[in-house]
């Protein structure tokens, strides 16, 4: 299932900037960055729960915001993309 992870980490302090880097590293380990604080991740249910657990361990819920959108595959699901960045289609054949 495609999962969209978005976050807004308060970077006014040194610790906030560290949290931002740690949150990005967790997201980079399972997905691809599509915007500065937006990642697309292909994970199953167990992977989703693990990702959520890891992200919640990094953010400060009093200062930061974390949103995870689960986008089920199926009829009518599509991502429309406009602009310079082209996301990798992990479902398509890999060409090297």
Image: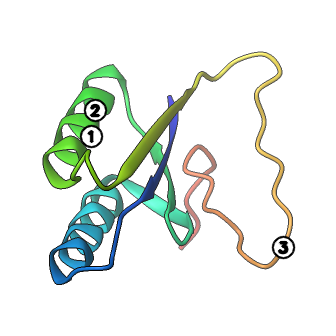
Q: Residue at x 26, y 48 (%)?
A: 62
Between disc 3 and disc 2, whose residue precedes? 2
Q: Is mark 1 on a helix, strand or loop?
A: helix
The mark found on residue 83 in the picture is 3
| Secondary structure category for the residue under label 3 | loop
Measure how far apart labels 1 and 2 are at the Cα level: 6 Å
Whether pointer 1 and pointer 2 mark residues with C-beta atoms closer than 8 Å, the reply is yes
Where residue 74 sits, quadrant-wise, is top right
Query: Are circles 3 and 2 on residues that touch, CB within 8 Å?
Result: no
**Around disc 2, counting alpha carbons within 10 Å, would you say few (fewer than 14), some (14 to 19), or many (20 or more)?**
some
User: Which residue is pictured at 33% across the width and 52% down the height?
Assistant: 30
Q: Residue at x 35, y 67 (%)?
A: 10
Ranked by sequence position, the earlier of labels 1 and 3 is 1
Marks 1, 2: nearer the viewer:
1
Cα distance between the residues tagged 3 and 2:
30 Å
Local crowd size for mark 1, using a 10 Å CA cut-off: few (<14), some (14–19), many (≥20): many
In the rendered view, tell whether residue 3 sits above or below residue 96.
above
Residue 77 placement (x, y as % from top left): 76, 27
């Amino acid at each position: 299932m495609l999962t969209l992870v978005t976050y807004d980490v308060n970077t006014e302090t040194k610790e906030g900037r560290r949290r931002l880097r740690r949150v990005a590293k967790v997201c980079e380990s399972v997905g691809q960055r599509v915007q500065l604080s937006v990642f697309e991740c292909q994970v199953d249910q167990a992977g989703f729960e693990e990702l959520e657990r890891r992200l919640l361990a990094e953010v400060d819920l009093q200062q930061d915001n974390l949103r995870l959108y689960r986008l089920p595959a199926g009829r009518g699901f599509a991502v429309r993309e406009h602009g310079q960045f082209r996301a990798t289609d992990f479902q398509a054949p890999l060409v090297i």
